[in-house]
Image: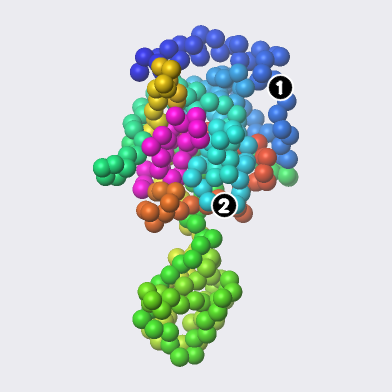
């Protein structure tokens, strides 16, 4: 706890250094395809880049981020820049430990990251509500919960038990075709089944087990929003061979949607990148603005 107290003292004794003209915070960044969301008056920058700000009066921590992924498999929602952009919706040009310190300044209490040995222990800590703000091409502002940008994976195979394929049912290899695993007796479909395709499949056979399997495949493949809450797990420090310490979340695990043992903020459900838990997430592409868009993230500890 002493290290965090020292860091907080440094941030609040010298915050004006981070807001001076000509400091690194005033250097040009990559241009956003849309306008940048405004920052509330009175928000204090906590880092030289000016990308992490404390809005004490509003009870929130603000992060200036950019959209870095709209399609793929997600492990993170936010990662530090140049770490996990290939599996994170947003990237932040700032340090994870400053985000940690900012949450402490708002009274949030960290718990612990998920543990996996000898048995699974879920992450714990205070709940943190996360909202994303952006401005679209028509100059219209938007604000939604971070969960609205994450859905259960649909770009995958779904399966439903079926003892045998009824007469008249045609199987195929295309994306819009049913397949059958005769070893495990599973009817299989890839991706999101459209309603008209479901009706076409159901019309082929009245067999009740087949009907139930098709309906199950349709239901499984529909987009479902992430319903989990974000919690302040707190990551951890690792001591290097030379005796210095590193805050482990700097490697990428700033805000996670898959449980990691070094997560700063994690989801309060069992979710693993390997899909061992049965949960795998992806960006809700249609809801996310273009790559490079400036997004102002609000982190609000729940008292």
Determine which residue is flagged by label 1: 27
The spot of residue 143 in percent (x, y) is 57, 41
Is 244 colored magenta in this rendering?
A: no
Mark 1 or mark 2, earlier in chain: 1
Which segment did they paint magenta?
Answer: 248-270
Give the label, 1 or 2, closer to the camera.
2
The spot of residue 299 in percent (x, y) is 49, 32
Q: Residue at x 71, y 14 (%)?
A: 22
The spot of residue 151 in percent (x, y) is 50, 53
Q: Which numbered circle lies on residue 72?
A: 2
Q: Visible in this render: residue 188?
A: yes
Residue 96 in the image: above or below residue 223: above
Instruction: State the residue in front, 90 or 241.
Output: 241
Residue 48 in the image: above or below residue 121: above
For the stretch drawn in magenta, the main secondary structure is loop
Q: Quadrant of residue 216?
A: bottom left
Q: Residue at x 60, y 34 (%)?
A: 82
Q: Compute the Cα span from label 1 to label 2.
A: 31 Å
């Amino acid at each position: 706890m002493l290290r965090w107290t020292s860091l907080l003292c440094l941030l609040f004794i010298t915050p004006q250094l981070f807001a001076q003209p000509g400091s690194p915070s005033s250097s040009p960044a990559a241009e956003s395809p849309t306008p940048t969301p405004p920052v509330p008056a009175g928000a204090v920058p906590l880092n030289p880049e000016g990308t992490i700000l404390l809005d004490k009066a509003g009870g929130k921590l603000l992060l200036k981020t950019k959209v870095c992924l709209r399609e793929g498999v997600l492990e993170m929602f936010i990662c530090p820049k140049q770490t996990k952009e290939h599996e994170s919706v947003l990237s932040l040009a700032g340090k994870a430990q400053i985000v940690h310190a900012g949450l402490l300044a708002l009274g949030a209490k960290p718990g612990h990251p998920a543990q996996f040995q000898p048995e699974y222990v879920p992450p714990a800590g205070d709940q943190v509500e996360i909202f994303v703000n952006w401005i679209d091409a028509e100059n219209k502002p938007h604000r939604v919960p971070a969960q609205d940008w994450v859905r259960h994976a649909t770009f995958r195979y779904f399966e439903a038990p079926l003892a045998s394929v009824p007469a008249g049912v045609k199987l195929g290899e295309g994306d819009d075709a049913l397949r059958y695993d005769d070893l495990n007796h599973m009817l299989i479909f890839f991706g999101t089944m459209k309603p008209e395709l479901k009706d076409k499949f159901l019309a082929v056979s009245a067999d009740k087990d087949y009907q139930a399997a098709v309906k199950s495949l349709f239901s499984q493949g529909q987009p479902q929003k992430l319903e989990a809450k974000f919690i302040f797990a707190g990551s951890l420090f690792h001591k290097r061979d030379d005796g210095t310490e590193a805050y482990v979340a700097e490697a990428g695990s700033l805000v996670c949607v898959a449980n990691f043992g070094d997560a700063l903020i994690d989801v309060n459900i069992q979710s693993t990148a390997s899909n061992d838990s049965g949960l795998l997430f992806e960006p809700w592409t249609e809801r996310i603005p273009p790559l490079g868009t400036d997004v102002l993230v609000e982190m609000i500890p729940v008292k």
